[in-house]
Amino acid sequence: MRSRTSRLAVESVLVLWFLSFTGEAFAATGKAVAASTSIWDQAVNLFGDFINSVAHYVGGDYGIALIIVTVVIRLLTMPLMLTSLRNSKKMQFLRPRMQELKEKYGKEPKKYQEETMALYRAEGINPLAGCMPMIVQLVVLTLLYRAIYTDHAMLFSKFLGILPLGVPDHTYILPVLAGVTSYFQQKLTMVQMDPSQQRILQYVFPIMIFFFAMRAFAALSLYWVITNLFTIVQMYFIQVKRTS
């Protein structure tokens, strides 16, 4: 459980790093991407068309359009999130039995793996279920990144007529919000983790997100902030309200 959560956090940071540092490469190949007929590039074009359609109905403000699109995506992927949470709770419940298996088969890695998978099957646990929400997020971030570079309307648009979305936010507003919301999002989603692991991710991860958001498109930072806020509200009603 610990290694999987750490891997997800690292994947998030790597994607932000990728999105932040490869801008010039995509800018140079923007026309080629737009002209491509591959399935992936068709997905990019469809995603861009979806944002453009929403922007058309909100006065051409791509920032507001992106907020609406983000909420729609989060609503559509909510079943994945709930499945991931149920899966995590089951794994938390099985932690003592996992420890017993480790003590019993610690010197036999193959046997330990077989017994672990057998336990997962018996309890109806999918070890990959926890990765799905993050995978979806990585795909959406990549689609958004490429959509911006293939659509000049988005690339040169401004949020509320003030904040350019196609360049990093040099006002530090979105990077700060990205870091702060990541902190609270981690705090709510890691309640079942080991305390030492939780402290590391809860403080280090938001700081890393802040610095990477300083180099990423403001549109990506805005997407990250809205996604975090949605998750915070979602986790509040799932965890806090349920226990009250």
Image (cartoon, helix red, strand yellow):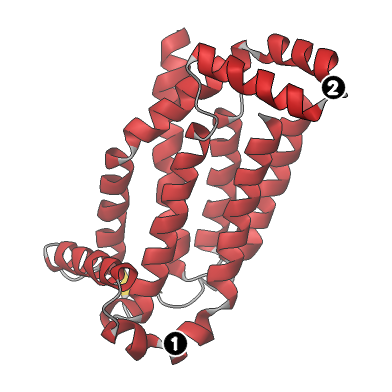
Q: Label 1's element?
A: helix
Front-lying residue, 71 or 149: 149
As measured in the structure, the alpha-carbon distance from the residue carrying label 2 to the one carrying label 1 is: 50 Å
The residue carrying mark 2 is 106
Q: Label 2's element?
A: loop
**Residue pictured at 43% horizontal, 42% vertical:** 229
Q: Can I make out residue 152 in this image?
A: no
Query: What is the three-letter code of the residue carrying label 2?
Result: Gly
Front-lying residue, 29 or 180: 29
Left or right, 192 with respect to 81, comes to: right
The residue carrying mark 1 is 27
Which quarter of the rendering shows the C terminus?
A: top left
Q: Of discs 2 and 1, which sits in the foreground?
A: 2
**Residue pictured at 48% horizontal, 33% vertical:** 129
Query: What is the three-letter code of the residue carrying label 1?
Result: Ala
Q: Is residue 206 above or below residue 42?
A: above
* Residue 135 numbered tag: none
Left or right, 196 with respect to 46, comes to: right
Q: Is residue 226 above or below residue 185?
A: below
Front-lying residue, 244 or 17: 17
Q: Position of residue 8 (x, y in %)?
A: 60, 44
**Residue pictured at 38% horizontal, 80% vertical:** 149
